[in-house]
């Protein structure tokens, strides 16, 4: 077990150069993060967790690549490359790539459940049929700038067509609402699976907890059931995948037949940020950045038109089944800050929400942002995505704060992130008040993003 409480002093040997390198003030912490990533490395990718998530996950790999850029840049490129080798012909990047060497029952739902081999245009390896937020171009661009090299530029050139195809898939097949936003077809696609943001659309999905009797959940073998989704949630997750799979994972005519269709602010902000990053990548490799800038602007406009509620000054998901914004005020609403073209009025609105008692952002803050509104009646500090703090969401918000020149708030957030992981270790998520580590105790993106915030 590489996870342990560390002191903030000491020395180490890792390369680096920023305040966070192994020879600096945070040397021992740097070493814990490095040991966590090393222990989770699996020939060409990094598993999120050896116990809970023993395969490759899509947005995890993006965040993990950012960490590897500080230690072993070749692994950052391998991480993204191995993921994009599993890209489907239609451009979707699957949310799980299954390792055939891991016993099929180690994770539920496993490879047999997804049955991707029966679908046209899928890669030789077994994958899920869902996607996750497209943070990969952002990660590739960030990783490259953290460790600029000729090899890095070659890798950007190699990844570019896949990154563009990923965006094209989301902009076309997934524009189910027809207004320029991509819909997610399952809460797992949001990456924040169990968020109260999905309670309203999920409540309309017909399912019965008893239907789970034919399956065996694995998550509750490794994590406390009280910290995980309920059986009824899982029955709905399974029902939604079953419906999507029955249609061959095709997106045509989903409104007529699919029980869950939502436009998510984080997912779409990630699309916009991806276009911004692709503009940078294109310029670096001699391609045309213009179309990417235009697409970023169009996505930003669509996020504003579809997901911003001027009455409350918040961004919230739109449920296509009801054509209404979902009621919960979750941390998803802060994600549009990563759009560099977000107008000043909405930047201020997001900051008002973030600095309110709901989320507690400040230049000096005891704890990072929770995943849900602290003042809400359904805030649950222990259950995943319904209150606990996560490093990836905090990293994204910090990225947005820096993009909008809010350096003081970004510094406050950074200090709280370092303090949290420095005290608790590289856990999957954290109690938003006490800071106690929850979920997997050796979680890769926590380690990777800690390295990145330590470095600058
Ligand atoms: C389902 C791997 C993934 C993350 C998600 C997180 C969790 C899976 C699960 O773990 O989801 O994809 O089994 O709960 O919610 O964000 O990518 O770390």
Image (tube, rainbow, N blue to C red):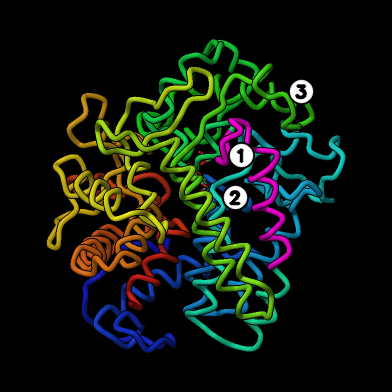
The residue depicted at 67 percent of the width and 46 percent of the height is: 94
In depth, the one of 189 and 333 nearer the eye is 333
Is residue 84 within the magenta segment?
Answer: no
- Which is more toward the observer, 362 or 348? 348
* Count of residue discs: 3
Q: Say which quadrant the C terminus sits in.
A: bottom left
Q: Bounds of the magenta span?
A: 160-184
**Label 2 beta carbon less than 8 Å to ligand 1:** no
Compare marks 2 and 3 and give the one earlier in the sequence: 2
Please tell me the numbered disc located at residue 246: 3
Decide: few, some or many residues near mark 1? Use Cα within 10 Å; few <14, some 14-19, many ≥20: some
Q: Earlier in the sequence, mark 1 or mark 3?
A: 1
Of 181 and 333, nearer the camera is 181
In this image, 113 relative to 344: left or right?
Answer: right
Percent from the top left, x then y, of residue 439? 39, 44
Q: Which mark is residue 107?
A: 1
Q: Per the image, is 178 magenta? A: yes
Evaluate if marks 2 and 1 touch, with contact meaning CB atoms under 8 Å apart.
yes
- In the displayed structure, does residue 45 sit left or right of residue 86? left
């Amino acid at each position: 077990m590489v996870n342990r409480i560390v002191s903030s002093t000491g020395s180490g040997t890792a390369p680096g150069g920023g305040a966070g390198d192994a020879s600096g003030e945070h040397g021992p912490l740097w070493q814990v993060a490095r040991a966590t990533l090393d222990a989770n490395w699996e020939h060409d990718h990094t598993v999120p967790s050896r116990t809970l998530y023993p395969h490759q996950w899509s947005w995890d790999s993006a965040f993990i690549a950012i960490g590897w850029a500080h230690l072993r840049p070749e692994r950052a490129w391998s991480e993204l490359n191995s993921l994009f080798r599993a890209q489907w012909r239609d451009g979707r990047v699957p949310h799980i790539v299954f390792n055939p060497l891991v016993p099929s029952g180690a994770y539920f739902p496993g490879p047999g459940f997804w049955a991707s081999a029966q679908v046209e245009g899928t890669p030789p390896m077994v994958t899920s049929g869902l996607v996750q937020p497209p943070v990969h171009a952002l990660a590739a661009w960030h990783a490259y700038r953290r460790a600029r090299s000729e090899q890095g530029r070659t890798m950007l050139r190699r990844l570019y067509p896949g990154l563009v195809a990923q965006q094209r898939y989301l902009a076309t097949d997934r524009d189910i609402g027809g207004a320029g936003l991509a819909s997610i077809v399952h809460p797992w696609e949001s990456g924040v699976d169990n968020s109260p943001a999905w309670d309203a659309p999920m409540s309309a999905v017909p399912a019965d907890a008893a239907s789970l009797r034919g399956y065996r959940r694995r998550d509750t073998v490794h994590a406390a059931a009280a910290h995980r989704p309920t059986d009824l949630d899982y029955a709905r997750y399974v029902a939604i995948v079953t419906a999507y799979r029955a249609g061959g994972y095709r997106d045509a005519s989903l409104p007529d037949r699919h029980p869950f269709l939502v436009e998510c602010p984080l997912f779409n902000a990630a699309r916009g940020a991806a276009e911004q990053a692709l503009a940078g990548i294109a310029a670096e490799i001699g391609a045309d950045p213009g179309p990417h800038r235009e697409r970023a602007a169009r996505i930003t406009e669509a996020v504003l038109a579809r997901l911003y509620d001027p009455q409350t000054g918040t961004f919230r998901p739109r449920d296509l089944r009801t054509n209404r914004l979902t009621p919960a005020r979750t941390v998803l609403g802060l994600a549009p800050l990563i759009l560099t073209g977000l107008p000043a009025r909405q930047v201020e609105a997001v900051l008002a929400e973030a600095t309110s008692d709901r989320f507690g952002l400040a230049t000096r803050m005891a704890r990072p942002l929770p995943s849900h509104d602290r003042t809400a009646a359904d805030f649950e500090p222990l259950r995943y995505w319904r209150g606990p703090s996560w490093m990836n969401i905090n990293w994204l918000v910090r990225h947005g704060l820096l993009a909008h020149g809010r350096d003081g708030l970004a510094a406050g957030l950074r200090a709280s992130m370092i303090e949290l992981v420095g005290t608790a270790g590289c856990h999957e998520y954290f109690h938003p008040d006490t800071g106690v580590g929850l979920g997997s105790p050796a979680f890769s993106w926590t380690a990777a993003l800690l390295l990145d915030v330590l470095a600058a």
